[in-house]
Image (tube, rainbow, N blue to C red):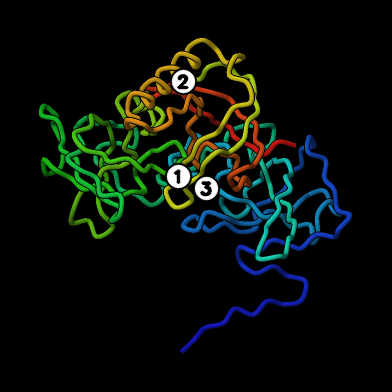
Amino acid sequence: SWLQTVNLPGTMAPGQEAELPEDFTIDKDARYTGTVLDYNKWRGFGHISLDQKGVVPEDKLFVHWKNIQTDDRFPRLKEGLQVEFGLMMTVKRQDFNKSSSVKAKTVTLPGGGMVNIQDAMDAEIMTFVGAQNLRYTGTIKFFDQMRGFGWVIIDDGFSLEEPVPKEIKVHATELHTGGKPLRMRLDKLAVEFGIIKSRKGDSYLAYNLTLPGGTPITQETLENRQAEGGQRYTGTVQWWHRWQGWGHIAPEDTSAFPAPVQQKLAEAAAQAAAKAKPGEAKSEEKLLYFRKADCEWSLRPEVGKKVTFTVYTDDKGAGATEVSAEE
């Protein structure tokens, strides 16, 4: 049979955001406090009840995992947790209709502390080989992004108190990716991790898998990304591949960029010119690469959209990050 969710008048459906009056405004710099009402860790969102009444409709605020400030490998909140946050407006367009909503941004613990709650929650439900903070080293044999798991080969030399096999499985939820989706192939990569028993107790799994030294496994780290100052620049989205989640930004003025960024852009332009076919026009346009993960959560990249950003260099060239719509 079909199940239908019924919403009482004046309440929000799961994942729904309250509609706003046309004259609704927010203080973008103000900080508020509240209590987490609910949070679905698998869907990555929940709701917060504000302590300050009358600020938002129903005194209830939508929160998305990308706005949680945390060092945990799997950003989350839990019911009853006291938090602090700011407010952000977002605009949703569907066909010819446009609607605005308000969400929580920069969610922290009261006083500004990081929302690091995963270790305590893991300690309540997991059985560790050795101790929770005991770390082993090894190599990722392979990791299948589509299926959400892979295998790790444990280095020789460890004296284990239980019959842990040489190769153990790792699930996607135990990859510490710094709170960002990872879309890279992983194999033959040196890592470190803890070891836990499966729920049935009949197998062993890798726990909280990171790069050596506890560094999160991020695409930025693997590509040796280097931030080039925190200055913001302006430009226009020149191209965007929606399904693959990346594109190019045409900067308004490249002469203001730091020298390493200018050098990378010049190298990329020269390489593009060298690859041009005979008789084909050689473009000297200098473009910055960017990914959806480099964008502010509410930004919808579109060709022609004016944006602001900071810049970086990595093994592949120069790029834009912290991309947001120009106000």
Label at residue 265: 2
Picture residue at 73% right of the left edge, 52% below the top: 102
Q: Quadrant of residue 232?
A: top right
Picture residue at 41% right of the left edge, 46% below the top: 122
Point out the frontmost of discs 2 and 1. 2
In this view of the protein, can residue 109 be seen by the observer?
no
Query: Is residue 244 toward the left or the right of residue 84 in the image?
Result: left
Of label 2 and label 1, which has the lower sequence position? 1
Type of residue at label 1?
Phe
**Is 270 rendered above or below residue 50?**
above
Residue 124 pos. (x, y %) = 42, 49
> In front: 291, or 49?
291
Task: Give the Cα distance between marks 3 and 2.
Answer: 38 Å
Estimate how packed mark 1 is, as few (under 14), some (14 to 19) or many (20 or more) residues with alpha carbons within 10 Å: many
Residue 136 pos. (x, y %) = 23, 31
Of label 3 and label 2, which has the lower sequence position? 3
Query: Is residue 64 toward the left or the right of residue 194 in the image?
Result: right
Residue 134 pos. (x, y %) = 29, 32
Task: Give the Cα distance between marks 1 and 3.
Answer: 6 Å
Residue 286 pos. (x, y %) = 50, 25
Label at residue 74: 1
Q: Are marks 1 and 3 in contact (CB under 8 Å)?
A: yes
Label at residue 297: none
Picture residue at 71% right of the left edge, 54% below the top: 61
Q: Secondary structure at mark 3?
A: loop
